[in-house]
Image (cartoon, rainbow, N blue to C red):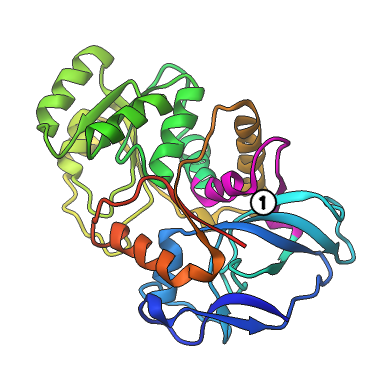
Amino acid sequence: MMKAALIRSVGKPDVIEWAEVPKPIAQKGQVLVRTEAVAVNPIDTYIRSGIVKATLPNPFIVGCDIAGVVEDVGSDVTRFSVGDRVWGSNQGQLGRQGSFAEWCAIDEQWLYPTPVGVSSESAAAGALVGITAHLGLFLHGRLQAGEVVFVNGGTGGVGSAVVQLARAAGATVITTAGSPEKAAQCRQLGATHVIEYKTQDLDERFTEITASTGPIHLWFETLRTQTLERTFSLLAQRGRIILMAGRDARPEFPVGPFYVKDLRAIGFAMFNASADEQRAAALQLNAALANGQYKPLIGVILPLSEAAQAHQLQEDNTLNSAGTLSGKIVLKA
């Protein structure tokens, strides 16, 4: 037996139980991972609450991200051996059990080697958000060196990954922050320009910044509510906007400003990417993790047994804009 953070029905964070369930066995093509660290993502809270409708096993172990050590491998596993350190994401999706458990049996296609010198906490914190940022910037956004990138929320999970990966690729990065402290953190991550949106006028600051950088080539939108009129006015000819948040968003779409500039709008969800696409992104992330170009932000570390508290904190910040979190919530087994 083992302990896991699980739900028996969807609902508020307090539906999460820390309870005993059978320890999994690595089946054909699977790797049994002894969990060392996991991370919380907004999608975890949407699935747990029922905002995202899904057919879930009962009981359902919550969580997408994991980092740990290989304890056993099933038949046909070729990439990993007992004792390897690994990380992964995409658990708790499409009928798969989640990662918030002491052990997890995971299809090897969703696991990647953890680089030497990178902690399991850091690997877990950078998993889903790092893959999401990489897919958006490079697979979908086709970012090129010398371009100008904007991302909302430079100290958020995805936002901080976008800032670091875009800067490492040779882009000029503009972002937003909610305080002078967070603005300083954004600059440390590689942002050239930071707008403190609570005290500065967004339009005035955009005008000042783009006077020196030129128009924005790639706008990575992380907000659940978009302001497309502003975005389109700031984009360069044939600029691109990446849309990856806001399932219920129905913003007004200014067709005229969009088509007369030959703009591109690209929507994507990380879990739609194939295993090969996600692995390609993960291996590039590993190189950035190993050389220090990608350092996932960790805001809070809790025991795995406090998954309900972690979900509440994530929900407070994602849905209720509490502003009490920078970086990721990581839980340690």
Residue 41 magenta: no
- Of 79 and 45, nearer the camera is 45
* Crowd rating for badge 1 (residues with CA inside 10 Å; few <14, some 14–19, many 20+): many
Residue drawn at x 61%, y 66% as measured from the top left: 99
Q: Is residue 17 left or right of residue 321?
A: right
Instruction: Give above or below for 255 relative to 175.
Output: below
Highlighted range, magenta: 108-129
Instruction: Give above or below for 49 relative to 314.
Output: below
Q: Residue furthest top?
A: 212
Q: Is residue 36 left or right of residue 300?
A: right
Residue 182: x and y in percent read 30, 35
Disc 1 residue type (three-letter)? Trp
Q: For residue 262, say whether it is visible.
A: no
Residue drawn at x 45%, y 24% as measured from the top left: 167
Q: Which residue is mark 1?
A: 87
- Of 313 and 254, nearer the camera is 313
Residue 329: x and y in percent read 45, 54
Residue 288: x and y in percent read 60, 31
Instruction: Give above or below for 268 relative to 264.
Output: below
Residue drawn at x 53%, y 51% as measured from the top left: 128
